[in-house]
Amino acid sequence: MDQMNPMNQMNRMQMIKAKIDSLPEGGVSASNHYWCVTCKKFFVLDKPQCPYMSGMCVNTPIAVENLAPESTEALEKFGLFYPKISQRILSSIIHDRYEETGRQLAQIYLDFLKEWKFDISQQQPLQTVKSFIILLTGCETAQRINEKSITFVLMDAAKIWGKGTIKEILKGSLAYLKEVLNINHVLGLDFIDILGEKEVGKYYCAKCGMLFEFGMRRDSVTCPLMSQKCMFDPRHIDNTDFSQDSLLKQLEITPDIYRRFIRGVAQGPVPSETISGILKEWKITDRQDEFAKRLV
């Protein structure tokens, strides 16, 4: 078949690249803030070029000044699929004043949305709250809604957080967001464990260089961001080699919402042993200072 012929495949790729080069360039962001309407990722970049599939992606990242992001739902990908390193750090440094801390985190989130040109008045309040919960916790989240209340159900929260701790933190967050977003329903929380003792999967894509963490461990998975278009399957990190530069790059170009969370609630320096212990799970054993700078 034609698709199995390396020469034909190479010619096709060259044709695609030539077509991409002939298309109009994207607009430059004065703040270096970009988002992609197709893969729904957000980036901090020097120029409007896809940082993962440069030269082959038909889209250009969109400057937030030229077109505001559509929905906070796209932010959920950070919490659902990106490595849960920052959430683990957060869970390790919050020891008291949980409700007050929750309000602080919600304020940081809304300030972040404003900077990234999200128009809260145009967003659905329920979606905005759900996106915050997923971003902060790293947990899949369901909703049970009736005429009086909305209950957010966090899945496998104990993989990252103490359930009592995150419940008290989110109690403060939800009280604040309910007030700011003018939500009439009573907001509540519940928890369900789906994976139990099963290991969460950590994956690396050799094509785009991204790392992911989600679901039950498997040898390989379908791309969680571009499942209908990506032809490459991320593999578990035990089954593939990757440069730690890949993780450094991902941390560098991902919007700094997690650094804001950590800096906003940390009551002192984050212990280096906390960061190094979490990074070892990702097979990162040196250049700890570089990672700490990007994380906290």
Image (cartoon, helix red, strand yellow):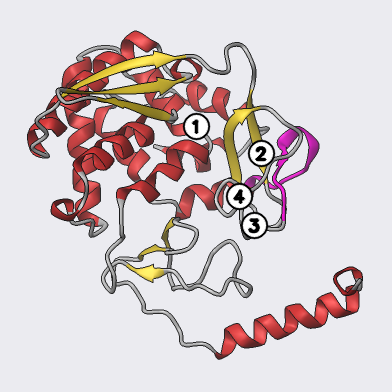
Q: Does residue 133 show up magenta in the picture? A: no
Image coordinates of residue 262 in percent, x first then y, are 33, 32
Measured in 3D between alpha carbons, the distance from the residue under mark 3 to the one under mark 2, in whole angstroms, is: 12 Å
Question: Type of residue at label 1?
Answer: Lys
**Mark 1 surroundings: few (<14), some (14-19) or many (≥20) residues within 10 A:** many
Q: Is residue 73 above or below residue 194?
A: below
Q: Which residue is mark 1?
A: 84
Question: Type of residue at label 4?
Answer: Met
Using the image, tell me which numbered label, if any, was put on residue 203.
2
Measured in 3D between alpha carbons, the distance from the residue under mark 3 to the one under mark 4, in whole angstroms, is: 6 Å
Using the image, tell me which numbered label, if any, was put on residue 210.
4
Location of residue 131 (image quadrant): top left
Using the image, tell me which numbered label, if any, was put on residue 208.
3
Residue at the spot x=18%, y=56% of the render? 119
Residue at the spot x=8%, y=37% of the render? 182
**Mark 2 surroundings: few (<14), some (14-19) or many (≥20) residues within 10 A:** many
Q: CB of mark 1 within 8 Å of CB of mark 4?
A: no
Q: CB of mark 3 within 8 Å of CB of mark 4?
A: yes
Image coordinates of residue 273 in percent, x first then y, are 51, 21
**Magenta residue span:** 232-244
The residue positioned farthest toward the top in the image shown? 164
Measured in 3D between alpha carbons, the distance from the residue under mark 2 to the one under mark 4, in whole angstroms, is: 8 Å
